[in-house]
Amino acid sequence: MRTRHSRFSGFAALLCGKASPSRPGAQALICLLLDSPSGGKAQPFRTAKRRSRRFSYPLLAILFLLASLVVLAAVETAAQAGQAQPGKAQSTKFELLDRNVVQARLRLSPQRNADREAELEKLFEQSGCTNLAERPVRHEPLPNVVCTLPGSTPSVIIVGAHFDHVWRGTGIIDNWSGASLLPSLVESLRHEPRKHTFIFIGFAAEEEGLVGSKFYAKNMTPDAVARTRAMINLDSLALGPTKIWLEHSDPRLAQSFNAVAQSLKLPLAVMNPRGADEDSEAFHRLKIPTLMVHSVTQQTFRILHTPRDNPTAVKFSDYYDSYHLLAAYLAEIDNQLN
């Protein structure tokens, strides 16, 4: 993750009430959009809300209520049409790797960026990736590393994570935690036929200004952009339970992610970091739906880009939960997305 150096209380109570596990999925999404975590504090997915200015005018509250009800109806209609239906994740097929395999890959965490790029290629090969390529990045010594898992249709889902890190600390959190998970996700998905072609990308030079992801997105053809149904970015996992950067995520992808988490009984919360950017942004500018997954809180954000980014910061049980949730989610959206 690259660092850069008011709430509707009455309205929210009217629409959302108290947090309830039984709240319909679309209503939960509306509640999410009303407000964001105060001060960067992580909130449970169903009650965390997008950032907004404080409004005290009754007319504005009524207008927002009407607009939200329209969106609520639209999302429920889409759900009835077969999109983003909760409760299917447990029937979706994927292979869950042994904890020791995932942990061993995380612990590798080479220090030099060139060694990280080489190690990532080895891990992709070990995972069974047979379509592996280095994609040079202009003006950069290291390439993007791309593993393609072919599907039965031309539609594409991109899963990305940068492999480079700053010189402070070991960078096991930011972002070997994301990069080393890509091969495990390949291995989890490759044993079953897939509708979508999955493209797993280890991005170079994120810490220099999102260079690898910007270069990849800039060089996508119009046809490639049109065929890409989603881009999921993984950055700074293993600091705790799974989080969504909701302000950088498509609401429908986020709702589906939450549904899978609920079906697996895995924790998920919303945390919108301040003063940072990440690799999904270039794809969002192309109007590709994105989902940004991380594990940072207001407190642990201070670990990034410091000597504290080292193996002692890793909470492996939470990291394995993130892997489990992501593997199930990728298999699920392969079935859901058109």
Image (cartoon, rainbow, N blue to C red):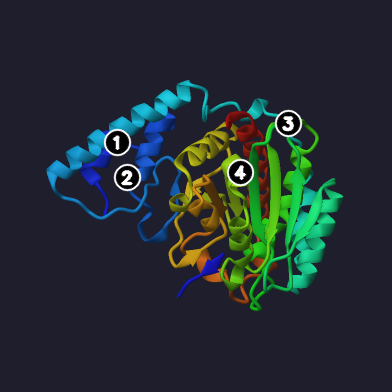
Closer to the N terminus: mark 4 or mark 2?
2
Q: Position of residue 306 (x, y in %)?
A: 59, 76
Mark 1 against mark 2, which lies toward the viewer?
1
Circle 2 is placed at which residue position?
A: 34
Q: Which one is earlier in the sequence, the residue at label 3 or at label 1? A: 1
Q: Are marks 1 and 2 in contact (CB under 8 Å)?
A: yes
Question: Which residue lies under the disc numbered 4?
Answer: 223
Q: Secondary structure at mark 1?
A: helix
Mark 3 — residue? 152
In front: label 3 or label 1: 3
Q: Where in the figure is residue 52, as x and y percent of width and height?
A: 30, 53
Q: Are marks 3 and 1 in contact (CB under 8 Å)?
A: no
Q: Tag 3, which secondary structure?
A: loop
Q: Residue at x 56, y 26 (%)?
A: 87
Type of amino acid under label 3: Ser
Q: Nearer the viewer, residue 322 or 142?
A: 142
Q: Earlier in the sequence, mark 4 or mark 1?
A: 1
Mark 1 surroundings within 10 Å by alpha-carbon count, few (fewer than 14), some (14 through 19), many (20 or more): some
At a point 67% along the width and 69% down the height, the residue shown is 138
Question: Quick check: 284 left or right of 178?
Answer: left
